[in-house]
């Protein structure tokens, strides 16, 4: 005859074991066993597709150099192609946050998409590192202990070029860009410094993102006859703009300057049309520092058939380095935002761009180089702005 108590014993044991397991699940020891889920939200199609690939390559390289781990936890990747489409940003972010339950978000390239992603990260209290998009709002009004950028604010290269062009004696300038946050803010930064230096923007020309029908605007530039042109374009759009500017016969008569995205990752395709162009950016090819040398070698070894590393690869790599620093401090717990922040704000990040720190708002404080296109490279001509910090207007921290 069965004792009435016997069937209950195993159940009690099971319940106790389950209770113990649930209790342990959140402990550092248990977390170290669980993989760290990293959600990559990047463009893999459209005009910024190559940028997304370079960022992912750089990020994976940093993680691989860290033994495939961040904060002691093995990294597991989840990916979404955001198509650089702001209308899909919330749904795409929620695929990673709610469906895949990622611990960390890394994204994205397009400023409009990044604002949707940052809002989702804030609403759900998930750690986010932006490896490109320069939208001022992300490290402005949306700043917080779970929001960081490994790249730049749109204001930074624009401001640096405003100073350069004013010092070079240009007085009347036309600007041309895509009509969205990145273009507007890049021109805004440029205007701030250029007007301070005595220059005047005679006309701001725009076209919708990601349009590349430049002909009518180039004709307008020719008839306005400014001293020079300042521009923000990137990716496939930058390739077409530089070639069209040259083909329209403007390159020799009206000097073209830009935020460095104009000629980064694009020189193979732009060819001779880009020769001699001057741009400002926080990276240049072949900078004279040991990290750059090691990074370029390691990148080309890891991705032998890819294009040489560019600014996007560096920003992806540094997103990985920043997560390695912050998550080492939290022992792999991505929800400890205060500890993560404390570690990052006192860190100096050893980047291929040169060492940089983060402002309180989580944006890099970094040198802006003046670069000149020589063959297939953006070579440093000088430092346009030393340790330039974004004003991070609206950040309350
Ligand atoms: C942006 O949308 O913020 C952006 C896109 C490409 C290059 C640089 C900035």
Image: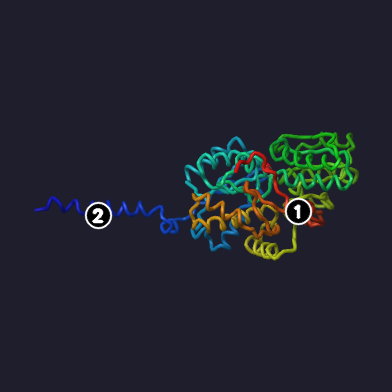
Q: Under tag 2, what secondary structure?
A: helix
Q: Is residue 28 above or below residue 174?
A: below
Image quadrant for the C terminus?
top right
Q: Nearer the viewer, residue 320 or 109?
A: 320
Q: Residue at x 23, y 52 (%)?
A: 12
Residue 124 seen from this side: yes
Residue 341 pos. (x, y %): 56, 51
Q: Residue at x 53, y 56 (%)?
A: 327
Q: Assess disc 1: are there few (<14), some (14-19) or many (≥20) residues with their C-alpha within 10 Å of its C-alpha.
A: few
CB of mark 1 near ligand 1 (< 8 Å): no
Residue 58 pos. (x, y %): 63, 56
Residue 54 seen from this side: no
Residue 330 pos. (x, y %): 50, 56
Q: Nearer the viewer, residue 73 or 247?
A: 73
Q: Is residue 358 above or below residue 182?
A: below
Q: CA distance from mark 1 to mark 2?
A: 65 Å
Of badges 1 and 2, nearer the viewer stands: 1
Disc 2: which residue: 13
């Amino acid at each position: 005859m069965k004792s009435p108590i016997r069937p209950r014993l195993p159940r009690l044991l099971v319940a106790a074991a389950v209770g113990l397991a649930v209790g342990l699940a959140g402990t550092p020891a248990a977390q170290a066993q669980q993989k760290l889920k990293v959600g990559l939200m990047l463009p893999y199609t459209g005009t910024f597709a190559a940028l997304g690939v370079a960022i992912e390559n750089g990020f994976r390289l940093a993680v691989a150099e860290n033994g495939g781990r961040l904060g002691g936890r093995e990294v597991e990747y989840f990916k979404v192609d955001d198509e650089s489409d702001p209308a899909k940003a919330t749904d795409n972010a929620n695929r990673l946050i709610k469906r895949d339950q990622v611990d960390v978000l890394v994204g994205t390239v397009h400023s409009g998409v990044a604002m949707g992603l940052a809002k989702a990260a804030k609403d759900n209290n998930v750690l986010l590192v932006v490896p490109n998009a320069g939208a001022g709002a992300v490290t402005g009004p949306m700043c917080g202990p779970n929001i960081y950028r490994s790249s730049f604010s749109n204001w930074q290269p624009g401001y640096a070029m405003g100073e350069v062009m004013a010092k070079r004696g240009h007085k009347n300038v036309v600007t041309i860009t895509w009509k969205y946050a990145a273009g507007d803010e890049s021109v805004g930064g440029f205007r701030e410094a250029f007007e301070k230096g005595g220059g005047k923007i005679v006309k701001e020309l725009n076209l919708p993102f990601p349009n590349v029908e430049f002909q009518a605007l180039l004709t307008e530039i020719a008839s306005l006859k400014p001293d020079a042109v300042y521009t923000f374009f990137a990716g496939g759009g930058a390739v077409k703009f530089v070639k069209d500017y040259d083909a329209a016969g403007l390159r020799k008569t009206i000097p073209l300057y830009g935020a460095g995205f104009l000629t980064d990752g694009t020189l193979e395709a732009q060819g001779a049309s880009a020769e001699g162009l001057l741009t400002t950016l926080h990276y240049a090819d072949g900078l004279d520092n040991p990290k750059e040398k090691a990074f370029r070698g390691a990148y080309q070894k890891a991705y032998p058939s890819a294009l040489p590393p560019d600014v996007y690869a560096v920003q992806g790599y540094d997103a990985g380095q920043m997560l390695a620093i912050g998550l080492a401090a939290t022992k792999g717990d991505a929800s400890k935002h205060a500890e993560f922040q404390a570690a990052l704000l006192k860190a100096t990040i050893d980047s291929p761009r040169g060492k940089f720190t983060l402002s309180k708002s989580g944006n890099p404080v970094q040198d802006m180089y003046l670069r000149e296109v020589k063959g297939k490279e953006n070579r440093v001509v000088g430092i346009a702005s030393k340790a330039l910090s974004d004003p991070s207007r609206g950040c309350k921290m």
